[in-house]
Image (tube, grey):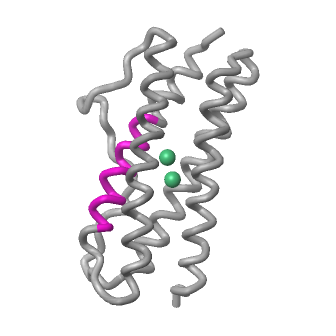
Amino acid sequence: MTTDEITDLLTEAYIDELETVMNYLTNAIVLDGVHAEEVKESLEDDVQEELEHARRLGNRLKQLEESPPGSEAFEASQSSLQPPEDTTDVQSVIEGVLEAEDEAIETYRALHEAASEANDPITEDVAVSILSDEEAHRTEFRGFQKEFPMD
Ligand SMILES: [Fe+2]
Ligand SMILES: [Fe+2]
């Protein structure tokens, strides 16, 4: 059985995924320098995965007889993922990605819990499967963070 909490979380997560797609795509384009190459490639790969997450969330909303939102419902929140003024500042992008992934992990944990409480195993499955991708993204960027320590 679905609840407002589930559809609200699915909608919020859908918007967050699309904001992540925009910011990862932008940063994959703007970063400069030899040290940036691996991070850019990783961001480029993640754009496809985050877009697929949005697709799965939108399809789940549709199955629950709700519509995923259009752009008028959009509210930006990822201030730390804005393209850096210094385009060789890979560290700031890494920190922004880690913040976004932590946020996503929190959202999917909440979605999993709400779905489990409401006895909605399909939404639970969507939450667990996306959660596993987000944890993998976080691990990868923690690795980059070690390579590019903050001062
Ligand atoms: Fe995602
Ligand atoms: Fe992610």
User: Over which residues does the magenta segment extend?
Assistant: 14-28
Tell me where residue 9 appears, x and y as whole percent: 53, 29
Q: Residue at x 55, y 50 (%)?
A: 103
Tell me where residue 63 appears, x and y as whole percent: 49, 13
Residue 90: name its quadrant. bottom left
Tell me where residue 126 appears, x and y as whole percent: 60, 31
Q: Residue at x 60, y 72 (%)?
A: 142
Q: Indicate left or right for 8 with 82 as reference.
A: right
- The correct choice, above or below, for 30 with respect to 74 in the image is below
Residue 87: name its quadrant. bottom left
- The correct choice, above or below, for 21 with respect to 58 in the image is below
Q: Taken as a whole, is the magenta stretch helix, strand or loop?
A: helix
Tell me where residue 92 appears, x and y as whole percent: 42, 75
Q: Residue at x 63, y 45 (%)?
A: 131
Q: Is residue 121 within the magenta segment?
A: no
Q: Indicate left or right for 70 with 2 as reference.
A: left
Residue 88: name its quadrant. bottom left
- The correct choice, above or below, for 8 with respect to 43 in the image is above
- The correct choice, above or below, for 121 with respect to 97 in the image is above
The quadrant in which the N terminus is found is top right
In the depicted view, which residue is nearer to us: 59 or 71? 59
Q: Indicate left or right for 130 with 96 as reference.
A: right
In the depicted view, which residue is nearer to us: 22 or 151? 22
Disc tally is: 0
Q: Residue at x 72, y 30 (%)?
A: 113
Q: Is residue 19 within the magenta segment?
A: yes
